[in-house]
Image (cartoon, rainbow, N blue to C red):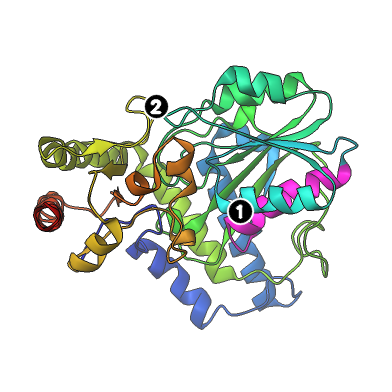
């Protein structure tokens, strides 16, 4: 099968699988135990932590990276944990954020917090004037995604973070789709959430970077294994996998970027020639995420018909809900237009032949749909 769903998850890198294997077999010690097996596991976890930290960039030394079960936990922890410690009870975010942010914000509203979910423009970018108007002295936290998981748009997070800091608020960046793809402006951030399985690492592990001096209450209570702030026994295998994947992503960043950009240009051409449109900004975006629309096409039917290609109509978290993408709705698409959109994700292991074949299969199936509707 041709895999074009890199925003949902990425194939496990062979180097990652090899690095994890010993910790799944013989290195099974609890990293929080004091005997030799435990100490060896703990050392492996710390090496992995250093590798993820280094992949985030030099500014990561100004804070600490904590392992979590994934980005969903990291985002929940960042939002609930900071606001629990703050005298300010308002959070500002964007309408195109991941459900892990939007659903948490909705929950906070039910707990009496003040929430402001800002609209975006048709290109998917927030108006800076809207951010300036919403962030005030009551705001404790501003949350914005760097690279959107559905349409690939890159938000001006440094400007958003500057507004937050000027008002005395913290800034949380969802960098799940950015790590290894675009530079994370860590110096502008107070908290950053990432995930291993988006960078050819294993599922079930992510993390939260917290700037020194930022106070965050625990989300999970128990043994406080992660620096006294996050409870639960860490998996050395998952940590090592994340660390190896992060190092690979950092080492291969330039090569991966060039590879994906070349494939994206190749893939866009036949769709453009067939009358498909790119959803979202064409200038501020990660081109490895192509969200394309052809009015009149049924994307769900297209996905089921083109069985040789794995692609999607949006976030894997919302698949099967029957609802049109909230991101596509936020940029002004009608329900029909949203349901006529597909997301094609490119990555390290995608080949030119796969891109050509996928375009041929998808476009042929779409043409059949449109001919039957005529």
Query: Which residue is denoted by mark 1 in the rendering?
Result: 100
Of the numbered discs in the image, which one, if any, rests on residue 26? none
The Cα atoms of the two marked residues, 2 and 1, are separated by 23 Å
| Left or right placement of residue 2 versus residue 185 in this view | left
Q: What stretch is highlighted in magenta?
A: 68-85
| Left or right placement of residue 278 versus residue 180 in this view | left
Which residue is the extreme one toward the bottom?
A: 25
- Label 2 neighbour load within 10 Å: few <14, some 14-19, many 20+: some
Magenta stretch: dominant secondary structure: helix
Query: Which residue is denoted by mark 2 in the rendering?
Result: 284
Residue drawn at point x = 37 percent, y = 33 percent: 280
Which residue is the extreme one toward the right?
A: 87
Residue 178 visible in the snapshot: no
Residue 175 visible in the snapshot: yes
Residue drawn at point x = 74 percent, y = 37 percent: 91
| Left or right placement of residue 162 versus residue 373 in this view | right
SS at circle 2: loop
Q: Residue 306 appears at what percent x and percent y?
A: 18, 64
Q: Residue 7 appears at what percent x and percent y?
A: 39, 52
Q: Residue 355 appears at what percent x and percent y?
A: 15, 50
Q: Residue 256 appears at what percent x and percent y?
A: 30, 42
Residue 29 to residue 204: above or below: below
């Amino acid at each position: 099968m041709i895999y074009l769903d890199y925003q949902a998850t990425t194939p496990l890198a062979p180097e990652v699988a090899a690095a994890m294997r010993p910790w799944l077999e013989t290195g099974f010690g609890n990293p929080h135990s004091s005997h030799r097996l435990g100490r060896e596991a703990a050392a492996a976890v710390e090496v992995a932590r250093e590798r993820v930290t280094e992949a985030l960039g030099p500014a990561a030394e100004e804070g600490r990276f904590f392992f979590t079960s994934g980005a969903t936990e990291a985002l929940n922890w960042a939002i609930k944990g900071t606001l629990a410690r703050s005298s300010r009870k308002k959070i500002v975010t964007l309408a195109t954020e991941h459900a892990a942010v939007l659903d948490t914000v909705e929950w906070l509203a039910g707990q009496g917090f003040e929430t402001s979910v800002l609209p975006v423009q048709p290109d998917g970018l927030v108006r800076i004037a809207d951010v300036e108007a919403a962030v005030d002295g009551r705001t404790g936290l501003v949350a914005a995604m760097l690279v959107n998981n559905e349409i690939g748009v890159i938000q001006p997070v440094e400007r958003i973070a500057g507004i937050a800091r000027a008002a005395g608020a913290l800034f949380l960046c969802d960098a799940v789709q950015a790590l290894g793809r675009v530079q994370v402006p860590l110096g502008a951030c107070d908290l950053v959430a990432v995930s291993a399985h988006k960078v050819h690492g294993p599922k079930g592990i992510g993390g939260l970077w917290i700037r020194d001096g930022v106070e965050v209450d625990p989300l999970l209570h128990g043994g406080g294994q992660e620096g006294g702030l996050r409870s639960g026994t860490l998996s050395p295998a998952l940590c090592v996998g994340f660390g190896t994947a992060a190092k690979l992503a950092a080492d291969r960043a330039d090569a991966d970027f060039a590879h994906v950009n070349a494939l994206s240009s190749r893939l866009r051409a036949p769709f453009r020639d067939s009358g498909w449109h790119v959803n979202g900004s064409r200038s501020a975006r990660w081109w490895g995420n192509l969200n394309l629309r052809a009015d009149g096409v049924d994307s769900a039917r297209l996905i089921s018909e083109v069985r040789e290609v794995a692609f999607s109509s949006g976030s894997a978290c919302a698949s099967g809900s029957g609802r049109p993408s909230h991101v596509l709705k936020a940029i002004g698409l009608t329900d029909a237009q949203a349901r006529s959109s597909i997301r094609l994700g490119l990555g390290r292991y995608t080949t030119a032949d796969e891109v050509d074949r996928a375009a041929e299969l998808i476009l042929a199936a779409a043409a059949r749909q449109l001919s039957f509707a005529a």
